[in-house]
């Protein structure tokens, strides 16, 4: 090999090394940008989730309060239903006695048969 060929080969090798180094540097910079963008996006998502935490906590507290009120209302409704059932039973007993009184009066009254005709 003569000196010109050697110089050309050296220049080609140096240019190739520089091109490879530039490509590697570009790839590293692009990777860093991608990772930084992903980190920023994750940070934004975390901040958004953190902001929603207060709302969720308040909503859960409100739900617990409403559930407690609903249980109390259900107990009150159950008690009122029992009272209504008892009042109905008592009213039926009185109605039966009143009806029995009418029947007894009709049985004793000699004119009771004529009124129905």
Image (cartoon, helix red, strand yellow):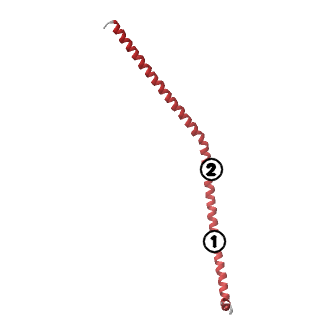
Q: Quadrant of residue 6?
A: top left
Rendered-image quadrant of the N terminus? top left
* Secondary element at image label 1: helix
Q: Is residue 75 above or below residue 44?
A: below
Q: Quadrant of residue 95?
A: bottom right
The structure residue drawn at horizontal position 62% and vertical position 53%, both measured from the top left corner, is 66
Q: Which residue is mark 1?
A: 86
Would you say 95 lies left or right of 7 here? right
Q: Quadrant of residue 3?
A: top left
Q: Which residue is mark 2?
A: 62
> Looking at the picture, how far across and down is residue 74, in whole percent?
61, 61
The structure residue drawn at horizontal position 46% and vertical position 24%, both measured from the top left corner, is 28
> Looking at the picture, how far across and down is residue 30, in whole percent?
48, 26
Would you say 104 lies left or right of 11 here? right
Residue 68 is marked as none
Would you say 11 lies left or right of 46 here? left
| Residue extending farthest top | 3
Given residues 87 and 37, the one toward you in this image is 37
Alpha carbons under labels 2 and 1: distance apart: 36 Å
The structure residue drawn at horizontal position 67% and vertical position 85%, both measured from the top left corner, is 102
Mark 2 is surrounded, within 10 Å at the Cα level, by few (under 14), some (14 to 19) or many (20 or more) other residues, namely few
> Looking at the picture, how far across and down is residue 4, in whole percent?
35, 7
CB within 8 Å, label 2 to label 1: no
* Secondary element at image label 2: helix
Mark 1 is surrounded, within 10 Å at the Cα level, by few (under 14), some (14 to 19) or many (20 or more) other residues, namely few
Q: Earlier in the sequence, mark 2 or mark 1?
A: 2
Given residues 15 and 104, the one toward you in this image is 15
> Looking at the picture, how far across and down is residue 70, in whole percent?
62, 57
| Residue extending farthest bottom | 110
Given residues 87 and 99, the one toward you in this image is 99
Q: Of discs 2 and 1, which sits in the foreground?
A: 2
């Amino acid at each position: 090999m003569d000196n010109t060929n050697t110089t050309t080969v050296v220049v080609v090798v140096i240019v190739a090394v520089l091109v490879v180094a530039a490509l590697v540097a570009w790839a590293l910079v692009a990777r860093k940008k991608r990772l930084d963008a992903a980190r920023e996006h994750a940070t934004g998502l975390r901040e958004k989730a953190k902001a929603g935490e207060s709302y969720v906590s308040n909503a859960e507290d409100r739900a617990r309060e409403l559930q407690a009120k609903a249980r109390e209302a259900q107990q009150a409704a159950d008690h009122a239903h029992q009272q209504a059932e008892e009042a109905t039973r008592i009213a039926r007993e009185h109605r039966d006695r009143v009806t029995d009184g009418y029947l007894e009066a009709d049985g004793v009254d000699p004119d009771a048969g004529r009124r129905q005709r």
